[in-house]
């Protein structure tokens, strides 16, 4: 099946720094990628939709200047958490949609802890 | 706005039991419905995808049904095993945007 990877799997950073998370579709081209955020024991909340070569579409309440999304190629999307604060600590998951499949494939997630 | 609810929030059963997880959604104009499994601290594994024109899908011990008119889906797990312990999430997909709206999940524990 299709594989989506995320890097890093876990990151700890100091408050005020920026963190970049990569999402890659390893064996298919993803025209659309999604970024989700999950708090402990909660469900996934869609943050933004990322289409290759165009600006991301952010969900209501998500600060686009805070969470920068770039989808420069059909296999890579990046999420940069700028000037991270402890309240940004969360589990970030990406998914990729592409090819003939009607299924989104999810990455393994990135655990971010901001101290 | 689409809202997806899953009941129960948590479920504990002895090994070997058959069980049903419930998912309901408020807007019946959905494209697809998908069931996922999430192990602690991990990403999502897709279990079953039901297209809006279908009523059910089966994979091994899993059977998912969909009733669009009533806004409900169920995931049936037969002969449960301790390895089935995980959080099960349902998600509905509306339209070509392919955005998923997730339920809050059911945390399943199968006791050996």
Image (cartoon, grey):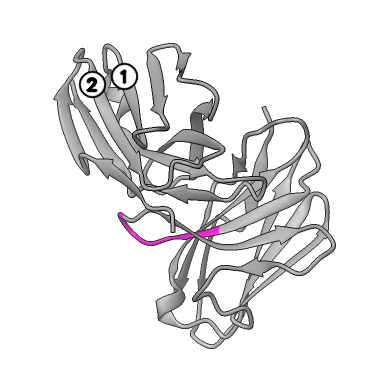
Residue B19 numbered mark, or none: 2
Q: Is residue B26 left or right of residue A67?
A: left
Residue A11, given in percent of the width and then of the height, sits at: 53, 66
Numbered tag placed on residue B77 in the rendering: 1
Q: Which residues are magenta?
A: A36-41
Earlier along the polypeptide chain: callout 1 or callout 2?
A: 2
State which quadrant residue A9 falls in: bottom right
Foreground residue among A14 and A88: A88
Q: SS of the residue at dot 1?
A: strand
Task: Work out whether residue B87 or residue A31 is closer to the camera in this orientation and state it.
Answer: A31
Q: Is residue A59 left or right of residue A86?
A: right
- From this view, report whether residue A101 is shown above or below residue B28: above
Q: Chain of mark 2?
A: B
Which quadrant would residue A64 be assigned to in this image? bottom right
Q: Are marks 1 and 2 in contact (CB under 8 Å)?
A: yes
Rendering coords of residue A5 (x, y %): 65, 46
Q: Secondary structure at mark 2?
A: strand
Q: Residue at x 54, y 88 (%)?
A: A16
In the rendered image, the quadrant that contains the C terminus of chain B is: top left
The percent position of residue A29, horizontal first and vertical second, equals 81, 42
Q: Is residue A32 magenta?
A: no
**Residue A115 visible in the displayed image:** no
């Amino acid at each position: 099946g299709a594989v989506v990877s995320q890097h890093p799997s876990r990151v700890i950073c100091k408050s005020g720094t920026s963190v970049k998370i990569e999402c890659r579709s390893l064996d298919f081209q993803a025209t659309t990628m999604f970024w989700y955020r999950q708090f402990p024991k909660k469900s996934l909340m869609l943050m933004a939709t990322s289409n290759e070569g165009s600006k991301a579409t952010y969900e209501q309440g998500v600060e686009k200047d805070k969470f920068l999304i770039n989808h420069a190629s059909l296999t890579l999307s990046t999420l940069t958490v700028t000037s991270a604060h402890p309240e940004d600590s969360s589990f970030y998951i990406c998914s990729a949609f592409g090819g003939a499949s009607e299924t989104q494939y999810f990455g393994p997630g990135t655990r971010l802890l901001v101290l | 706005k689409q809202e997806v609810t899953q009941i129960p929030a948590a479920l504990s059963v002895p090994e070997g039991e058959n069980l049903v997880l419930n998912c309901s959604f408020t807007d019946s104009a959905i494209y697809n419905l998908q069931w996922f499994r999430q192990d602690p601290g991990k990403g999502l594994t897709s279990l079953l995808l039901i297209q809006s024109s279908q009523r059910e899908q089966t994979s091994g011990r899993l059977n998912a049904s969909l009733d669009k008119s009533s806004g409900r889906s169920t995931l049936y797990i037969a002969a449960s095993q301790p390895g089935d312990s995980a959080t099960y999430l349902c998600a509905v997909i509306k339209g070509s945007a392919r955005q998923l709206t997730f339920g809050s999940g059911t945390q399943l524990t199968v006791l050996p």
